[in-house]
Image (cartoon, rainbow, N blue to C red):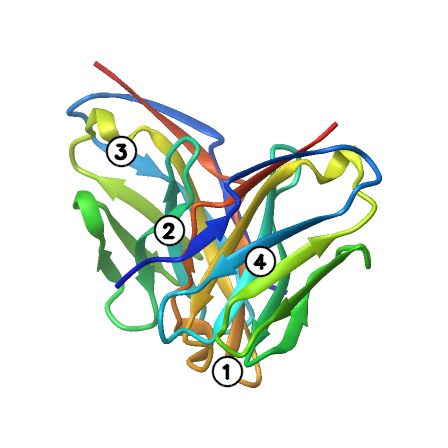
């Protein structure tokens, strides 16, 4: 069975400093991995996804993530935090089924706080 | 292209009542998935529909049901509401044929409060 573990439930950074949100996954085959962001009282927005192409994936708003198979990790980074980055971030693995569809399995989420 | 829309955005119900939530996918998308988000359990998969057929179901009681119409719009129904059903219900749409690599696009959610 597929699963994801987000290693930090809360991360706090100062504006302008780097962001690192950690995610480990468990999968019996080459996974599809996603990072979604949820701002307060909003739905989920896709930040980026990995689907077995380049291991370094660039997403929106300056975020990127690196797929490391040897470490089963897919950590999300950003060089310089902005106040608007304050939100909850979800690492997600896609569980595949025959028939062409998938089911998303979510990590517990990491709440990012950005201080002036 | 318009995104995924969900109606209503907010609902207040009392225990024992039933509720119906609606989701309109992105134009051209044929797959609609539903998720429940609660502070205690996080985000959990409810079910997925494609071309009016349920292809997959999560581990929820039979009080949770859904359907999909020929225009790909989907509804979910919760009968005999319980306090624990209070949650944000999210709908996501995708093409439905590309398997694990496919991106699901989420709507803003319906927040249900059961009193």
Q: Locate residue B111, reporting x and y percent.
A: 56, 38
Q: Which residue lies under the disc numbered 3?
A: A19
How many numbered discs, if any?
4
Using the image, determine if residue B8 lies above or below residue B30.
above
- Mark 2: which secondary structure? strand
Q: Whole-Å distance between the Cαs marked 2 and 3?
A: 14 Å
Q: Is residue B25 left or right of residue A4?
A: left
Please tell me how crowded label 2 is: few (under 14), some (14-19), or many (20+) other residues with Cα within 10 Å: many
Q: Are marks 2 and 4 on the same chain?
A: no
Decide which of A79, B47 is in the foreground and name it: B47
Q: Locate residue B28, reporting x and y percent.
A: 36, 76
Q: Which residue lies under the disc numbered 4?
A: B34
Q: Residue at x 50, y 41 (%)?
A: B9
Q: Is residue A15 left or right of residue A9?
A: left
Q: In the image, which is nearer the foreground, mark 2 or mark 4?
A: 4
- Specify the label residue A35 is tagged with: 2
- Mark 1: which secondary structure? loop
Decide which of B34, B73 is in the foreground and name it: B73
Q: Chain of mark 2?
A: A
Please tell me how crowded label 3 is: few (under 14), some (14-19), or many (20+) other residues with Cα within 10 Å: many
Q: Which residue lies under the disc numbered 1?
A: A100
Q: In the image, which is nearer the foreground, mark 2 or mark 3?
A: 2
């Amino acid at each position: 069975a597929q699963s994801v573990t987000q290693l930090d439930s809360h991360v706090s950074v100062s504006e302008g400093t780097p962001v690192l949100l950690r995610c480990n996954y468990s999968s019996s085959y080459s996974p599809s991995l996603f990072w979604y962001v949820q701002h307060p009282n909003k739905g989920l927005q896709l930040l980026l996804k990995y689907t077995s192409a380049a291991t370094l994936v660039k997403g929106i708003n300056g975020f990127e993530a690196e797929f490391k198979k040897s470490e089963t990790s897919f950590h999300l980074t950003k060089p310089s935090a902005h106040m608007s980055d304050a939100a909850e971030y979800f690492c997600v693995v896609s569980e595949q089924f025959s028939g062409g569809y998938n089911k998303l399995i979510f990590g517990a989420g990491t709440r990012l706080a950005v201080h002036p | 292209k318009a995104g995924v829309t969900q109606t209503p955005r907010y609902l207040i119900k009392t225990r024992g009542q039933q509720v119906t939530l609606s989701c309109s996918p992105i134009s051209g998308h044929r797959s609609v998935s539903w998720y429940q988000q609660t502070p205690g359990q996080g985000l959990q998969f409810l079910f997925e529909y494609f071309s009016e057929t349920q292809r997959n179901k999560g581990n929820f009681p039979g009080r949770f049901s859904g359907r999909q119409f020929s225009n790909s719009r989907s509804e979910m129904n919760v009968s005999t509401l319980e306090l624990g059903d209070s949650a944000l219900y999210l709908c996501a749409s995708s093409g439905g044929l590309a398997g694990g690599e496919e991106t699901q696009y989420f709507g803003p959610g319906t927040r249900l409060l059961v009193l």
